[in-house]
């Protein structure tokens, strides 16, 4: 129920200028829950190794977007393993709080991560939790 209340918000339909300063991808190190959020034509990935639930990984970004008056939708989530020492990011799984509407879009998450971390190998899988 708490995640459902965070899934979408009202706000500006064209947020490009408003979100220009918002980082597209923020990850911690190690295994973490993550979410993919869409605001207008931009996608954002947020992961947090301390997050007990996917909503905990999403909340800082959602609050930032709401403060900017920007509408958003959490498209789904899963897990990310971010291994900076080995230049690897693995994206997989799903979120019970933010289930994907249709097939998982780890491909979009991978594109955001690859742009944020040039030179890092990014792989995806729809398997696992």
Image: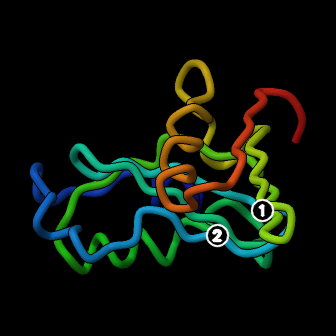
- Give me the disc on residue 82: 1
Q: Where's the N terminus, which quadrant?
A: bottom right
Q: Secondary structure at mark 2?
A: loop
Q: Is residue 32 left or right of 111 when viewed as pictured?
A: right
Label 1–label 2 contact, CB within 8 A: yes
x and y percent of residue 19 in the render? 23, 68
Q: Residue at x 87, y 42 (%)?
A: 129
- Give me the disc on residue 27: 2
Q: Is residue 79 left or right of 117 when viewed as pictured?
A: right
Q: Is 16 rendered above or below residue 92? A: below
Q: Is residue 7 left or right of 90 when viewed as pictured?
A: left
x and y percent of residue 90 in the render? 78, 47
To which quarter of the image does residue 126 belong? top right
x and y percent of residue 71 in the render? 23, 56
Q: Residue at x 10, y 51 (%)?
A: 14
Determine the CA span between mark 1 and mark 2. 7 Å
* Rendered image coloring scheme: rainbow
């Amino acid at each position: 129920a708490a995640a459902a209340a965070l899934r979408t918000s009202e706000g500006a339909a064209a947020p490009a200028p408003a979100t220009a300063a918002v980082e597209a991808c923020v990850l911690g190190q190690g295994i973490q829950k993550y979410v993919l959020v869409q605001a207008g034509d931009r996608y954002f990935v947020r992961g947090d190794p301390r997050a007990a639930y996917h909503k905990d990984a999403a909340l800082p970004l959602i609050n930032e977007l709401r403060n900017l008056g920007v509408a958003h939708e959490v498209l789904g989530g899963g897990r990310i393993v971010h291994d900076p020492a080995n230049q690897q990011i693995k994206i997989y799984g799903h979120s019970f709080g933010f289930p994907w509407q249709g097939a998982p879009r780890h491909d979009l998450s991978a594109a955001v991560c690859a742009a944020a971390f040039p030179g890092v190998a990014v792989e995806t899988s729809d398997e696992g939790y």
